[in-house]
Each structure stands twice: as C-alpha cells, then as structure tokens.
Image (cartoon, rainbow, N blue to C red):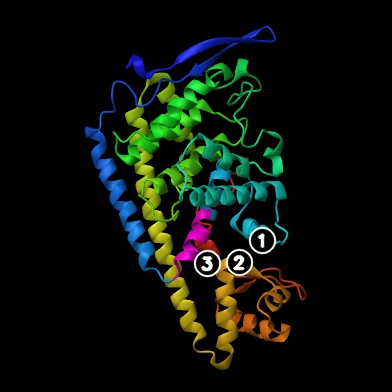
Amino acid sequence: MQQRIGTYITQKVAKESYKAYVPPKLPPQPPIDLLPLYPYLEKATRAIAELNSIYKIIPNPSLFIYMYVRKEALLSSQIEGTQSSFSDLMLFENNLKPLVSVEDVEEVSNYVQALKYGLERLKNFPLSLRLVKEIHSILLSGGRGSTKMPGEFRCSQNWIGGTRPGNALFVPPPVTHLNECLSNFENFLYDESLPALIKIGLAHVQFETIHPFLNGNGRLGRLLITLLMCAHGMLEEPVFYLSLFLKQNRHTYYELLQEVRHSGTWETWLEFFLEGIYVSAKQAVHTAEQINMLFAKDFKKIAAVGRARFSCEEILEYMKRLPQVTVPLLARELAMTAPTARSAVNHLCTLGIVEELSGKKRDKIYVYKKYLAILEEGAEPLQI
C-alpha cells in the first residue's frame, strides 16, 4: 500500500518551510482490487445505458443537451461558491441582466462554452494535455480568472485552503515536478487496461492532486469527467450532471480526495465515484421524464384555447429555452405584435402554465415556474 502514497517534498519560501505532495504514477500499485467494485460498476454502467436510451427517444433531445450542459456548469461552479442560479445564467446568455454578480454568471457561461469546445474538438483531436490547456483558456476567459494564466500550466506554487503554503490544507506538486506528473497523467488517459469508469475516477483524483493551473482546477477536473465519458463512448451526448451529487456530498468528496493522498484508499473513492455516476444518471433520466410529462400536459391545456393556441404554443416553445420573459422581449424575438404577445401570456397565466413574477402594473415578468423548478432542483447556490 505504501507504493500508492506519494512523496512529500520540503520546500522553503520567505524563511517558512512547507511540504508539497508529489503523487505516485497511475495506474496505482498494488493494482486496484476490482472484485468488490464490480457491483457498483455494473449498476453505474446500466444507469448510463438507460440514460443514453431515453435520450434517443425523447421528442426534444437538443433541448436536454442545452439544459443539462448548463445544469452541470452551474452546479460545478456552485461547488466553489458561485452564487449564480439557472435563471441568472439564462438571462445572461440572452443578453439580459442577471440578478447576481455578472462575474459569477460569466464563470458558469464560460464552463458551458469550454465543455462545448472540448466535445467538438474530440471529434478529430485526442484528449491530451494540449486540449486540456485549450479548454482551460476558455474556462478562464474573461471574469475573475482572466489574470490567472488561462490555458497555461502554472509557473509558481499553488495551494488549497489557508492563506499560504505554510498553513494550507494541501499543497500540490512543486513546479519542478509538474512536467513529470502531467506526462504520466496524459499517458494514463490512453491506458486501456482498466474499465473506462474506473479509469475516469482515477484520472479525476490525479488531476485534482496535480492541480496544474493557478485557477479553475476543480471546475476543469469535473468537466473532464463528462468529457472522458463522451470520449470513451459511454455518453453519446453530455446529458449528465455529476456535480449535483458532488455538491450534495461535497464534504465526503473532499475528504475522500485527501484520503487517497494520505492512505492510498483508491477503492473507497471509486465506490463513492461509481455511486455518484449511478445516482446522477438516474436523476438525469427522472428529470427528462418529469419535463416531458409537464410539456405534454401544458400543450394539451393550450390545445383547448381556440385560435389563440398558435401564439401560445410559439411562446411556450420559446420559454423552453428562456423560462423568464417579458411581453416586449416576446414581441421582439417572435416577431409578434405586443397585444398578441400580451394576450397569449395572459391565456398561459389563466391556464396556470405561466406565472407573473413581478407584481408590477408595467414591465411584468412572466415565468414558466414549474419547468424552472424541475431544472433548478438541487441547483440553489450554497449559503456562504
């Protein structure tokens, strides 16, 4: 087991000593004991297969890709304290003013763009350190991360927790060991000796331990899970949000990462990781079913309103992408007259599909609240 534990290297800065951790190479030695992990692996693999199959038969797959990518981006950023909500992200992406710090929402939006870029690049380029750096440059473009060397591995020591390396919770490898650690990490990405989900679970911890960038390592490490699942053909589309499980179990998540470093307990981490994959895939299936049931019920209600149903249907289709609207926005985006848009949203309010949120006489805001409630389940910002 000792071979699974890395080396602490004493470093010195401003007369203060600290110990930086250099992880052992992957795959772990002694090898992972797969036997007790097989039930977790089988359960997780079946749940992903179910998610892939439901994605193929739902009537609006592109909407689910659109929404699930954003849910993963939102949750992953919330783990690190971002206060953005689903509504804020969609308002920002539609050039409307969010209710929280624009920097918070921009971080989430960058995550969406980074994941989309990575998936597109994977079609003709291998998952490599070069691609990881390209994705990182998008993740940190604009906002708070733009001064933290986007797209470049760090040239100085970083740390996790505390105010300096000397009082930190964890200090990743020194810069002098970074190339060796990253070279082994990249080689491991092409290792075919382990089941894909086991490999992805190992790679996630190693990336978090190496912490190769000055900023954005946590978000990028979680993004790589989805990217690797797609690269291995496990997920046909990124209709998956593991970060909800990690957010809900974040204390265990961080504790298990530390335990691997201190004790080499890879199997304990992998049990947790595989359970997270299973729970997340099941949640994604359940969300798809809930949303489709809601759409079917609401469009059935609209069918009974006579001639107004066409404008009502058009508005509800639009609100699938932006569940929070105003009459001027609808008139502009859907090339409707303002009276037509107002009449249609009033019909939708009467039917109990849409709710007026502001309580104002003018500048009223209409929300597809039941739909937004499903999307935002578990995605409330953490209280900090």
| Direction top: furthest residue | 15
Is mark 2 in CB contact (under 8 Å) with mark 1?
A: yes
What is the CA distance from the residue labelled 1 to the residue labelled 3? 16 Å
Q: Which residue is under mark 2?
A: 322
User: Which residue is pictured at 49% across the width and 38% down the height?
Assistant: 250
Query: Circle 3: is it few (<14), some (14-19), or many (20+) Cα within 10 Å?
Result: some
Q: Is residue 66 magenta?
A: yes
Residue 364 position by quadrant? bottom right
Q: Earlier in the sequence, mark 1 or mark 3?
A: 1
Q: Is residue 129 above or below residue 316?
A: above
Q: Quick check: can you spot residue 255?
A: no
Element type at mark 1: helix
Q: Which residue is under mark 1?
A: 91
Query: Circle 2: is it few (<14), some (14-19), or many (20+) Cα within 10 Å?
Result: some
What is the CA distance from the residue labelled 2 to the residue labelled 1? 7 Å
Which circle marks residue 371 in the picture?
A: 3
Q: Nearer the viewer, residue 98 or 172?
A: 172
Element type at mark 3: helix
Residue 212 position by quadrant? top right
Q: Does 10 sit left or right of 195 as displayed? A: right
Q: Nearer the viewer, residue 381 or 296?
A: 296
Residue 51 position by quadrant? bottom left
Q: Nearer the viewer, residue 232 or 96?
A: 232
Q: Amino acid at mark 3?
A: Tyr
Query: Circle 1: is it few (<14), some (14-19), or many (20+) Cα within 10 Å?
Result: some
Q: Is residue 363 above or below residue 83?
A: below
